[in-house]
Amino acid sequence: QKEVEQDPGPLSVPEGAIVSLNCTYSNSAFQYFMWYRQYSRKGPELLMYTYSSGNKEDGRFTAQVDKSSKYISLFIRDSQPSDSATYLCAMRSTGRRALTFGSGTRLQVQP
Amino acid sequence: DAGVIQSPRHEVTEMGQEVTLRCKPISGHDYLFWYRQTMMRGLELLIYFNNNVPIDDSGMPEDRFSAKMPNASFSTLKIQPSEPRDSAVYFCASSLGRGLSYEQYFGPGTRLTVT
């Protein structure tokens, strides 16, 4: 079993929809949680970062971490065609700089 | 800043040949990471360096893979001999050793095809 599980999709939604992306993990030592966005044939870029449990909001994006359930989510409000990309969750434990990534969810927002 | 620079962007080689991938991290960053991305296995860490010293190479698949960082502005990942199963996109990333998130900045990747 992988340390981080993520539904690969693809997920297709109409423009303006609310999108929910999720990851589960098994390593209770993970303390830092991130969401990266990767456009086709590009490198991943950091979208959201959260430490430990709780919510974090940045514009149309909200990241949630539930450590008790070992579950993290990314919500995208008012989705746009420009949000079409692969979204990767990533996490790491304290003292370790290496990230463990989910396999990525491919999102397509239809105009 | 130009960001993380990788070369070549594409590499096609025959099985058994030596392949060298190159990376220039963002100036001032003291961590450098090499990742490999495939459809089957996703994005996997191969090795990372801190201040040019390898810290964790547990992700390097086998002895055919080696990585070096001779100075703060250059790193190489070498595969010798290459095999078709090495076909993947190889990413280099760098980060600062301080700050809240230790955000990793990724390069554009090298797409390697071994025939």
Image: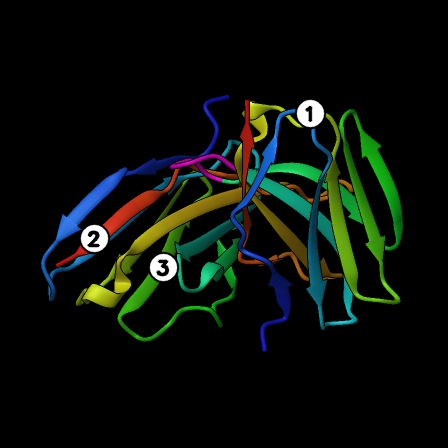
Placement of the N terminus of chain A among the 4 image quadrants: bottom right
Q: Main secondary structure of the magenta part?
A: loop
- Graded by Cα atoms within 10 Å as few (under 14), some (14 to 19) or many (20 or more), the crowding at tag 2 reads some
Please name the residue that numbered disc 1 is placed on.
A16
- Residue found at x 17% / y 67%: B81
Task: Work out how far the residue at label 3 is from the one at label 2, CA to CA, in angstroms.
Answer: 19 Å
Q: Position of residue A8 (x, y in %)?
A: 53, 55
- The numbered mark, 3 or 2, whose residue comes first in the sequence reads 3
Please name the residue that numbered disc 2 is placed on.
B113
For the residues beneath circles 3 and 1, the answer to whether they share a chain is no
Q: Chain of mark 1?
A: A
For the residues beneath circles 3 and 2, the answer to whether they share a chain is yes
Q: Which residues are magenta?
A: A38-43
Three-letter amino acid code of the residue under disc 3: Ala
Q: Position of residue A5 (x, y in %)?
A: 62, 65
Q: Nearer the viewer, residue A79 or B74?
A: A79
In the picture shown, does residue A5 fall above or below A80? below
Please name the residue that numbered disc 3 is placed on.
B67
- Graded by Cα atoms within 10 Å as few (under 14), some (14 to 19) or many (20 or more), the crowding at tag 1 reads some
